[in-house]
Amino acid sequence: MCNATNGGVVFAVAAGNSGADAAGSIPAAYDDTVITVSATMEGDDWPSWSNWGDDPADWTTNDSAPVAIAAPGVSVLSTWNDGGYNTISGTSMASPHVAGAIALYLASNPQAADYSAFTNARAALLGAAEETSGNFSNTSGNPHDEDFLDAGGL
């Protein structure tokens, strides 16, 4: 993953679904090479099962995997393994929203799609994200600090 990131590949990965610190989830714990995504649900809140991590502003402490951003991850309609569709929930349903936003950003900003694409994409995502601190209720019971994806703000 490190070589791919250094080569310009940007990974959006699921934080995990056990309502725990993402530091125990691989590859979410690889905070210097991936953008880790938690899930949001209706009402701009986090589900209790969505893993969490350090506030991105505290990434230098290394005591927890930073969960960079949150995206819709509850009752998401997607393709299914039988060739049809299914509605499912999880951070694995949230991370494709972020991957799509990254693709849109890099397509609109080709100068950013070089060896530093990871740094550029992460900065753009976090710069455009909707700040959650003090703005939304967190009924999950977990210490979510990550902001909400705002792909339209890229």
Image (cartoon, helix red, strand yellow):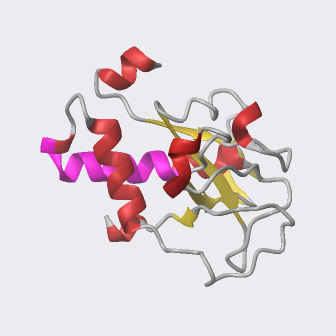
- The image position of residue 151, as x and y in percent, is 41, 64
| Relative to 128, residue 114 above or below | above
* Direction from residue 50 to residue 65 in the image, left or right: left
* Direction from residue 28 to residue 151 in the image, left or right: left
Please give the name of the residue rendered at 39% of the width and 34% of the height, measured from the top-left corner. Answer: 10
Along the line of sight, which residue is nearer the eye, 147 or 41? 147
Considering every residue shown, the one lying at the far front of the view is 61
* Direction from residue 121 to residue 52 in the image, left or right: right
| Relative to 49, residue 17 above or below | above
- The image position of residue 6, as x and y in percent, is 32, 22
* Direction from residue 30 to residue 129 in the image, left or right: left
Query: Magenta segment range?
Result: 97-111
Please give the name of the residue rendered at 34% of the width and 70% of the height, measured from the top-left corner. Answer: 153
**Main secondary structure found in the magenta portion:** helix
Along the line of sight, which residue is nearer the eye, 6 or 55? 55
| Relative to 110, residue 57 above or below | below
Please give the name of the residue rendered at 59% of the width and 57% of the height, measured from the top-left corner. Answer: 55
Please give the name of the residue rendered at 32% of the width and 56% of the height, measured from the top-left corner. Answer: 124
| Relative to 120, residue 146 above or below | below
- The image position of residue 18, as x and y in percent, is 86, 44
Reply yes or no: does residue 87 show up in magenta.
Answer: no
